[in-house]
Image (tube, rainbow, N blue to C red):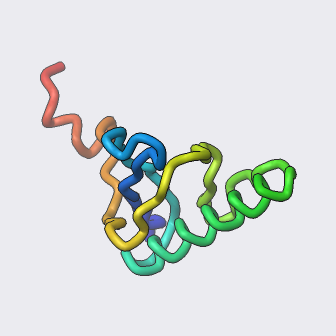
Amino acid sequence: MHPRIYVVDVPIHNTTDPARRGLHVFTGVADSPAAALRRAYEVYEAALAAHTAGREIPDKQPDSWGARGLRPGWHMDWAAAKAGLWHNPVSWTSLSDFAL
């Protein structure tokens, strides 16, 4: 069986200008949406702790999760985060959707 790759979208907003909004996106291998949310939160917390301590942000973990793009001054709304299976837009299985 192929690993199941999940995407986790976490709404974010700028703490000094709440009108500035966006998404922070995480991807990695998991066995459920709940596990994907948990891993995304864990790698974010590890990255934030490293950044706060002045250390280098950890690279991707063996299960492919990582958090390299921290944005100081932005709030992550984990309560509104959503997880689902990631679909590769350029997958060979979806080529029938494109005219060649």
Question: Residue at 59% across / 60% down in the picture?
Answer: 65
Quick check: 57 left or right of 68? right
Residue 61, image x, y percentages? 70, 61
Residue for point 74% across, 51% down: 59
8 left or right, relative to 45: left
Picture quadrant where residue 89 is located: top left
Q: Nearer the viewer, residue 46 or 28?
A: 46
Total labels: the figure holds 0
Horizontal side, residue 71 vs residue 61: left or right: left
Tell me which residue sits at (51%, 65%) in the image: 29
Residue depicted at 40% across the width and 41% down the height: 17
Residue 51 percent coordinates (x, y) = 76, 52
Residue 33 against residue 71 in the figure, above or below: below
Above or below, comparing residue 35 to residue 84 in the picture: below
x, y percent for residue 21:
34, 43
Residue sticking out furthest to the front = 16
